[in-house]
Image: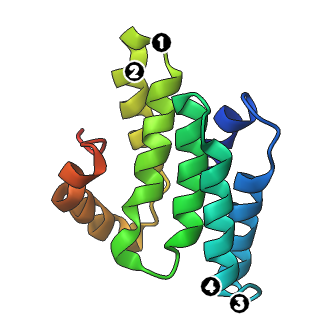
């Protein structure tokens, strides 16, 4: 997710909480942080986005979502959806749809072959609850 779209966040704020959340999420995957650490970091990342313009807020929410749900596969699409929303919100109005599709395609290009079909099926099934961002 291109650093969960953190450049969009950094453009508005020098608050390090979203980046710290991602660092803790990676540490959790290596067994170096607890789920409590991850949840606390997620809350902090989400809080960092409050009151900021949509691109920055969605980037912070993407980071928070990524670390909060790393342990629950059923919640895996939230971080990707927020990153797509951040990319679209950062584009000028006439280019928002193209930015959404470009981010979606970029994310899909990064999917490992062994999970690609599962993720694409999950996106189709849960697109409506993810703001329809996974529409081709």
User: What residue do we see at 82% from left, 38% from top?
Assistant: 14
Would you call the spot at circle 2 few (<14 residues within 10 Å), some (14-19), or many (20 or more)?
some
**How far apart are the two marked residues, 3 and 1, measured between alpha carbons?**
41 Å
Would you call the spot at circle 4 few (<14 residues within 10 Å), some (14-19), or many (20 or more)?
some
- Residue marked by disc 3: 31
User: What residue do we see at 72% from left, 29% from top?
Assistant: 12
- Residue marked by disc 2: 96
Determine contact: label 3, label 1, CB under 8 Å. no
The location of residue 81, given as percent across then percent down, is 40, 49
Left or right for 94, reference 135: right
Q: Compared with residue 6, is residue 45 higher up or lower down, i.e. above or below?
A: below
Query: Is residue 39 something that shows in the picture?
Result: yes
Query: Which secondary structure, mark 1?
Result: loop
User: What residue do we see at 41% from left, 67% from top?
Assistant: 76
User: What residue do we see at 23% from left, 54% from top?
Assistant: 129
Q: Indicate which disc, 3 or 1, sits on the residue closer to the N terminus.
A: 3
Q: How many marks?
A: 4
- Residue marked by disc 4: 35
**How far apart are the two marked residues, 3 and 4, measured between alpha carbons?**
10 Å
Query: Is residue 1 something that shows in the picture?
Result: no
């Amino acid at each position: 997710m291109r650093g969960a779209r953190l450049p969009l966040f950094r453009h508005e704020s020098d608050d390090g909480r979203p980046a710290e959340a991602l660092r803790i999420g990676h540490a959790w995957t290596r067994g170096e942080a607890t789920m409590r650490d991850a949840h606390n970091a997620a809350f902090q990342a989400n809080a960092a986005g409050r009151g900021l313009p949509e691109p920055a807020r969605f980037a912070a929410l993407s980071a928070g979502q990524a670390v909060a749900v790393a342990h629950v596969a059923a919640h895996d699409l939230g971080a990707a959806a927020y990153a797509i929303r951040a990319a679209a919100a950062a584009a000028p109005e006439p280019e928002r749809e193209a930015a959404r599709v470009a981010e979606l395609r970029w994310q899909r290009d990064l999917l490992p072959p062994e999970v690609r079909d599962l993720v694409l099926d999950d996106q189709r099934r849960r697109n409506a609850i993810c703001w329809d961002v996974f529409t081709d």
